[in-house]
Image (cartoon, helix red, strand yellow):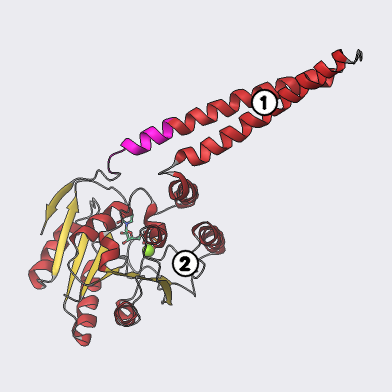
Amino acid sequence: MDISVVVPLFNEAESLPELTDWIRRVMKANGFTYEIILVDDGSNDGSWEVIGQLYEQNPFIRGIKFRRNYGKSAALNVGFEATRGDVVITMDADLQDSPEEIPELYRKIKEEKFDLVSGWKAKRYDPLSKTIPTKLFNAATRSMSGIHNLHDFNCGLKAYRKEVVKNIEVYGEMHRYIPVLAKWAGFTKITEQVVEHRSRKYGVTKFGFSRFINGFLDLLSIFFVGKFSKRPMHFFGTLGTLCFLTGLGIIVWLIGSKLYDIANHVKYRNVTDNTLFYIALVAVILGSQLFLTGFVAEMISRNSPERNHYQIDKTI
Ligand code: UDP
Ligand code: MG
């Protein structure tokens, strides 16, 4: 099979017939063998019933239904596990991503041998209140992840070599940072393709202002998970040790100079010495606490089970 299209969806009943028909037309025109995996992320607007009807008309459609809403990352993850195609395309259900982009995405993976091609909505029709934070997030993600050639990490339209999706786990809110997950897994041939940004035809966005707060937390987790989740001791241990040694150094120096004063009969009592001594003492205590925090985190991360705990209700 050439292509698996994975579509995470939450209350998108109205869009689905048009979306699947559009994908079908593009696949047919290009002679691709394909499947469309519709992952219903706990919709309550009859999306699952629509998926059932669409399946009656098109046997290349498959459906997975979550018992409740687990979020876009979990939906993508379960879709990835189900894929059978050589190239995997993800796209949003809301008709904002155009299936017409698929042939070129496919070509970049197959012929140019990229691991991941990320869509870049170069021209957006969003208000500044959305585009400015998005730009900041993308800039921060670029510098933290070292993937300098992507403008837009969060675009729903992406293409992957099948090995990529089989070797990453998308969890929490990490759907915004899949190129980073791919890079961590060793898939470094990453590029982007300018794609059209259409406005939502039916329904409303599923992410409100909370997207920015969650996005910010994800950014922190990128930094910590990426660099330190396997080795939290490296972060907290280093910080703790530095803090501890600085404090200890100051105390040793204070005691040393006091002893020197006594030995040389210098009568020298300065109140700042005491202040400095207490600061140094706090640093020593703080340092050992940080070190212990790292130790505990290390124990937890070494024993933590898988991160995804979603339950599948039905599949077709
Ligand atoms: N989505 C999902 N689970 C959620 C929220 C969203 O599967 O909990 C899907 C949604 O149905 C759509 C895609 O993720 O197919 C992108 O969501 P949306 O269009 O609301 O995001 P935006 O385009 O505003 O970034
Ligand atoms: Mg959308």
Query: Residue drawn 32% across and 54% down?
Result: 170
Q: Which mark is residue 152?
A: 2
* Residue 88 placement, left or right of 96: left
Q: Residue furthest front?
A: 263
In the foreground, 234 or 34: 234
Residue 167, position as x, y percentages in the image: 28, 58
Helix, strand or loop: magenta stretch: helix
Closer to the eye: label 1 or 2: 1
Q: Residues within 10 Å of mark 2 (few under 14, many from 20)?
A: many
Instruction: State how many labels appear.
Output: 2
Query: Residue drawn 23% across and 67% down?
Result: 16
Q: Which mark is residue 248?
A: 1
Pointer 2 residue Cβ closer than 8 Å to ligand 1: no
Q: First in sequence: mark 1 or mark 2?
A: 2
Magenta residues?
296-306
Q: Amino acid at mark 1?
A: Leu
Say if 182 sits above or below 161 in the image. Answer: above
Q: Is residue 304 magenta?
A: yes
- The image quarter containing residue 33 is bottom left
- The image quarter containing residue 248 is top right
Query: Residue drawn 37% across and 62% down?
Result: 186
* Residue 17 placement, left or right of 100: left
Q: Amino acid at mark 2?
A: Asp
Q: Secondary structure at mark 1?
A: helix
Q: Residue furthest right?
A: 266
Q: CA distance from mark 1 to mark 2?
A: 47 Å
